Amino acid sequence: MGLYDGVDLRLNVPHSARMYDYYLGGFTNFAADREAAGHALAVAPWLRTGARANRSFMRRSTRHLAEAGFDQFLDIGTGIPTSPNLHEIAQSVRPGARVVYADNDPIVLSHAQALLTGTPEGRTAYVEADVTDPVGLLAAPGLRDTIDLSRPVALSLNALLHFVPDGHGAYELVDHLKSVLAPGSALVMSHVTPDFAPDDIARLVRIYESAGTAAQARTLAEFVRFFDGWTLLAPGAVPTPQWRPAADEPPIDAPDASAYAAVAVKP
């Protein structure tokens, strides 16, 4: 059987995950994705840089949390695998780490096997679930079989919630996820903002909406609201390139990322 056998990828319709893959220079994208991504890049040529900055934040935050003792990770809105993936970073620090990936995109499902190759000591799992149904997501057998929710979990919602407008209950679903996690858990998030390039972002939102993907950029105050009741780790909510940048990473200006990032811990 081929990789995509039995999976309806709707290749004639652009998909945000495949467009993101294109920004990163990946190859799991198709003509409709490249056309929509081309329109987006025409109004915001910094998108490739922003995607790389977001990916780098994922790597830095995962490593930091693993080094701080976290050995359970839940990554919702996984996207198309791009090495190093979250489990590779976490398990390079803590070989026994357990990682669950969750996504509702059929193309991610078709690539899930690439996400299930971890260390012999650890465990990785993939569940097909939607962040807009947090109750169903948390009840998925693959999740419960891999992660112990009575112990601290590092929850990642990277580059995800700007595709969940307020009308779809973005804050409510995050509050539900936060409520079931044990004290000491962490919330890791990045999110597109209009604060640095409002005209570009407004045009981008229209492009995504015309391609069939709901989108909403959020200001710093709107972003920080997701972390209500939890303790932000230094340096707080900042542009993605400014969250504990590595010395060997080239500097990226905030407008070229146009996204915020933060990590918070549950008291």
Image (cartoon, helix red, strand yellow):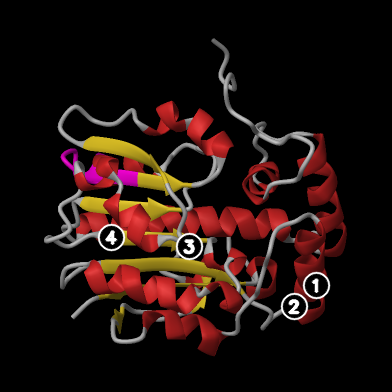
Residue drawn at (53%, 85%), measured in percent from left and top?
222
Q: How many numbered discs?
A: 4
- Spot occupied by residue 212 in the image (x, y as percentages of width and height): 75, 56
Q: Secondary structure at mark 2?
A: loop
Q: Is residue 38 visible to the viewer in this orientation of the structure?
A: yes
Which badge, 2 or 3, comes first in the chain's sequence? Answer: 3
Per the model, the C-alpha gap separating discs 1 and 3 is 27 Å
Q: Secondary structure at mark 3?
A: loop
- Between circles 2 and 3, the one closer to the viewer is 3
Q: Quadrant of residue 256?
A: bottom right
Front-lying residue, 30 or 93: 30
For the record, the magenta segment spans 92-100
**Label number found at residue 188:** none
**Label number found at residue 200:** 1
Q: Are marks 4 and 2 in contact (CB under 8 Å)?
A: no
Q: Assess whether residue 94 is covered by the magenta stretch.
A: yes
From the viewer's perspective, is residue 120 above or below residue 233? above
Q: Amino acid at mark 4?
A: Ala
Q: Are marks 1 and 2 in contact (CB under 8 Å)?
A: yes
Front-lying residue, 168 or 241: 168
Q: Quadrant of residue 224?
A: bottom left
Which badge, 4 or 1, comes first in the chain's sequence? Answer: 4
> Which residue bears the numbered disc 3?
132
Per the model, the C-alpha gap separating discs 4 and 2 is 30 Å
Q: Assess whether residue 207 is covered by the magenta stretch.
A: no
> Which residue bears the numbered disc 2?
197
**Label number found at residue 154:** 4
- Spot occupied by residue 167 in the image (x, y as percentages of width and height): 60, 77
From the viewer's perspective, is residue 241 above or below residue 95? below
Residue drawn at (41%, 47%), measured in percent from left and top?
102
